Image: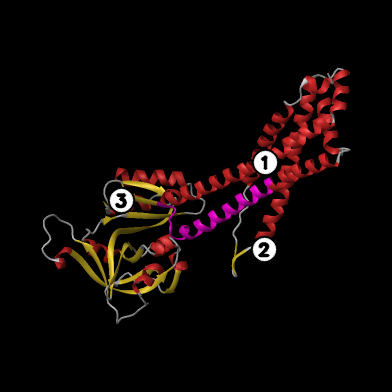
Amino acid sequence: MNVSLYIAKRYLRSKSSNNAINFITYIAIAGVIVGAGSLFIVLSGFAGLKDFTLEFTSVVDPDLKAESAVGKSFMLYPFDIENLNKIEGIATFSKTIEERIIIESQDKNALAVIKGVDENYQNVVSIDSVIDHGDWLDQKSNQIVVGWGISNDLSLGVLNFTKNINLYVPKPGTGQITSSKNAFNTVKVINVGVFFINESLNETYVFSSIDLAKTLLNYETNQVSGIEFKLKDGANVEKARAEIQAALGNKVILKNRAQLNDALYKMLNTENLVVYLIFTLVLIIAFFNVIGSLIMMMLDKKQSLSTLFNIGVTQKDIRQIFFLQGSLMSIIGGIIGIIIAFIVTLLQQHFSLLMITPTLAYPIAIELENFFIVFFTISILGIIASKIASVRITESLISNK
């Protein structure tokens, strides 16, 4: 058996005759346990928040979306639709049109984005699940469904026929504008529903039928802004993506859910990284206790170390003793901290110990990668701290000269 490891284990288990050193050691181990547990809980909390945030956007995000590679729109011809229908991985798809507009009612107006959708849109995404009140629109009408933010800003009710609602979009063309009436295309609409997804989408989108959007924007029959796809369960996403790209050619670019919410994903990942770095800094400070504990242990065991040195144990082996002791202290403390934190996160998931609102528990997600991240972080910091402490072993310290 490795002598250094054997002695390191003995030192780790045994108590010192000096109560102050025992107290410092307990504080060091407690710091590692609390630090590891806190890091795991925070990472699990952010994972839960990430899932909670993306849960809302995923409701209205398709599996794949084709957007124009050049400009705002492209032409979708009948033979394109035939080619798409032949792709085995596609369950269904919906043609859409998106453009910035002005929505006006009773001398109030707001900038918005109109999203004209066809009859298949409800089969591609679960739009019905986010309708806060009212109903989804009828394709053969001038009905719209607005976000909660727009509804609140313009005081829009549902099926309020006494209040005029107009959509405006600038007419394409060049030259000087001589009349405001000739500067905009406009349609009168009636609001039949209000959706609630998240703050950004609630204050941005107005849904309409695709025909109404085409009329407002002077689009041609086959002209669209995008195509949103729902894939069959178990379908190979990359294979379906390649087949769709081949069917539509270079006139479109395809995006998955992560790419559609690129800014949101980057923000969430950046926040997660920042929190990890902050807690790692806290752990670094905590590991100064480990260094102090090892140095105090060296001084306390000075006589024993001198005896070991005199019977032939080398300085390198004695350094190895305290290096292994510090590493074991860190790894064991980290494992205990992770286990405690795992139990806490399970209790939060099942018993909702911490509430955001009276009806909403703080979201938390247990991910396998967080176990490895915390264990790896604790192990690396513990090894570094142990190495720093162990180099304090000098020949003059252990030879009593």
- In the rendered image, the residue lying farthest to the front is 401
Residue type beneath disc 2: Leu
In depth, the one of 108 and 252 nearer the eye is 108
Give the labeled residue for mark 1.
375
Comparing labels 3 and 2, the label whose residue is closer to the camera: 2
Whichever of callouts 3 and 2 sits on the residue coming sooner in the sequence is: 3
Between the C-alphas of marks 2 and 1, the distance is: 25 Å
Q: In x, y percent, where is residue 74?
A: 27, 51
Residue found at x 68% / y 42%: 286
Between the C-alphas of marks 3 and 1, the distance is: 52 Å
Q: Residues within 10 Å of mark 2 (few under 14, many from 20)?
A: few
The label shown at residue 304 is none
The label shown at residue 353 is 2
Give the labeled residue for mark 3.
80
Whichever of callouts 3 and 1 sits on the residue coming sooner in the sequence is: 3
**Viewer can see residue 287:** yes
Mark 2 residue element: loop
> Magenta residues?
35-64
Comparing labels 3 and 1, the label whose residue is closer to the camera: 1
